Amino acid sequence: KAGTVGADGLRQAIRTWHAAHPGRRLVGRARYTRPDTIQWDDANYRGDAYAAYSWAADVAEVEVDLRTYRVRVTDFVAVQEVGRVVNPTLATGQVQGGVAQAIGWALYENVVLEDGVMKNCQMTNYIIPASSDLPPIRVLFEEVPSLFGPGGAKGIGEMPIDGPAPAVINAVCEGLRVSINEIPLTPERLMERIVTTTEAQRHTGA
């Protein structure tokens, strides 16, 4: 029977149908109607793509060994605005996991491709950070309840992994006054970048 139901009503209707027709296949159709609060121009791709956005700010403190050119993250602060935090323990773990993986992207994880095939796909040659390579990861939440999410919550998802790598690289750039636009920032790449920058400054008299 056609009609309009919410998510809870739909789940209950499906359970009731399956109970009445065991073993039979249920095929349904659904249509999404954009809420009046969201304005979107399909022709020009302009407007509100989503009802709510989550936000984040990341700050990294780094140390650089100028003999080995090894970068180490010594402290990290991640601030997340994800609406109402429903489960602080799980949300904190999600953020810490994202930061840890992003530090791997920034400094360690170097994908080597040959003819479209990854050549370093083993744990022996694809380096990821160990717990000893990670700094204290301090997580802070700025709770601004959403008008659209359940209980005022918004999504957190993969947002914690987006900002940490740029934060780490920007910290190195700020400290050494060099420009870096690729990751991972291996010691070899950092040494090359410092040498290139120094030579350029020597030639320009900067």
Image (spheres, grey):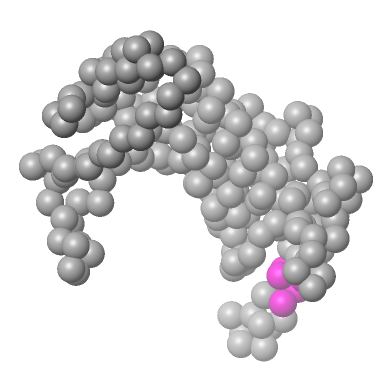
Q: Is residue 169 above or below residue 12?
A: below
Q: Residue 156 at what x, y percent from top left?
A: 42, 33
Asked whether 64 or 104 is in front, the reply is 104
Instruction: Please give left or right for residue 99 compared with residue 185 in the image.
Output: left
- Given the current orientation, which residue lies at the most extreme right position? 124
Asked whether 32 or 60 is in front, the reply is 32
Q: Residue at x 75, y 69 (%)?
A: 116
Q: Is residue 79 magenta?
A: no
Q: Residue 127 at what x, y percent from top left?
A: 81, 46
Q: Residue 102 at what x, y percent from top left?
A: 61, 44
Q: Residue at x 66, y 49 (%)?
A: 105
Q: Residue 147 at what x, y percent from top left?
A: 18, 28
Asked whether 23 or 135 is in front, the reply is 23
The image quarter containing residue 117 is: bottom right
Looking at the rendering, the stretch of residues picked out in magenta corresponds to 192-196
The quadrant in which the C terminus is found is bottom right
